[in-house]
Amino acid sequence: PSRHVGFDSLPIQIEKKLLKRGFQFNLMVIGRSGLGKSTLINTLFASNLMQSSARTSPEQPLPQTMEIEPKSCLIEENNVRLELTCIDTPGFGDVLDNEKCWDPIIKYIKDQHSTYLRSELTAKRPLFTPDTRVHACLYFIQPTGKGLRSLDILVLRKLCEVVNVIPVIGKADALTSDEKRALKTRIREELNFHRLRCYPYDLETHDEDDRKSNALIRDMLPFAVVGSTKEYTVDGTTFLGRKTRWGTLNIEDPEHSEFIYLRDFLTRTHLQDLIDTTSQIHYETFRCRQLNALRQ
Ligand code: GDP
Ligand code: MG
């Protein structure tokens, strides 16, 4: 029998190194204002990172997000440090002139690629390039039976080319189970019809298992979510919930909200893949274009 050399500790050595450095994840939210974007971010990461537009008094106007605002916080779980940056965007589609309302958003995404590329191209590269590239973009769709609006299709077409897009239906408590099922199917069909390629993608590097899990996710899109940061206690159990016509809804109850599916997908199963895909697909495409343009 051959003697044990010890390189089987490599994964542990890598883990140690990664834990020391920590992780960076940048998440963007996009959609019409009032669809529950800020609330969902706060719910997802159990934080109060985003200011939600809940009115403090009825006379006050809703405090809306007016510009692209990245906000960061450091969260830690069992020695794993995650620097989370959420990029809230002004709700679009509210104004009459929707022309080019997505331009600043696309520009923001490309600017981060550009900053990263510039850092890589400097003669004296930093030991570790800070990553501000947008790793995932939650695209909020209205909870009405109408499906995607033409503006959604226009914006999604631009977005899918530069970032991992994850479509979600906001404020899904406005829908009955049947309505929810019908709307999800309709949106999936529309995404396919318009060839809008959302995340996750099947890549050459994926094995059979990855493909299976991606197919399952794709059948679930868009996630119909309900967000809340308010706790309720019913029959002795305390949960994050929302009062509806039918009673108090637990946002972690998959019967009513696909919040936990989205959270598991974002944080427990696909976080690293979102980061890798951003770097290997979206950033790579950007980098190639820029370098080719330079050569001409
Ligand atoms: P944003 O403009 O998209 O960021 O929306 P906000 O998160 O600020 O939410 C706007 C309002 O809708 C606030 O009063 C929230 O309490 C409420 N809200 C947020 N999420 C939900 C939800 O899932 N269901 C319902 N019914 N209301 C929600
Ligand atoms: Mg907001």
Image (cartoon, rainbow, N blue to C red):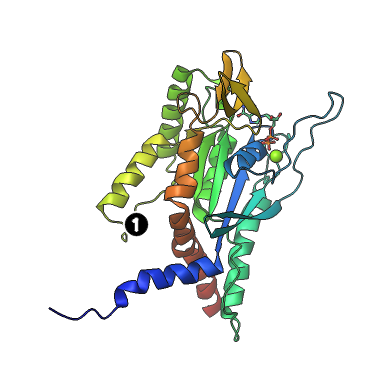
- Looking at the image, residue 73 lies above or below residue 97: below
Residue nearest the observer in this picture, 42 or 3: 3
* Position of residue 60 in the picture relative to residue 66 (left or right): right
Counting from the top left corner in percent of width and height, residue 156 is at 53, 44
Q: Residue at x 29, y 78 (%)?
A: 6
In this picture, residue 224 sits left or right of residue 52: left
Does residue 181 appear left or right of residue 109 in this picture?
A: left
Residue at the limit of the structure toward the right, as seen here: 59
Residue 157, visible in the rendered structure: yes
Q: Is residue 202 left or right of residue 103?
A: left
Q: Is residue 288 visible?
A: no
> Mark 1, residues whose alpha carbon is within 10 Å: few (<14), some, or many (≥20)?
few
Q: Is mark 1 within 8 Å of ligand 1?
A: no
**Residue most extreme to the left:** 1
Q: Position of residue 88 (x, y in %)?
A: 67, 47
Identify residue type, mark 1.
Leu
**Residue 224: image x %, image y %?**
50, 31
The residue that mark 1 highlights is 203
Q: Nearer the viewer, residue 74 or 103?
A: 74
Q: Residue furthest bottom?
A: 123
Which quadrant of the figure shows ligand 1?
top right
Q: Position of residue 276 (x, y in %)?
A: 45, 61
Looking at the rendered structure, the secondary structure element under dot 1 is: loop
Residue name at image x 50 percent, y 42 percent? 263
Name the residue furthest top: 246
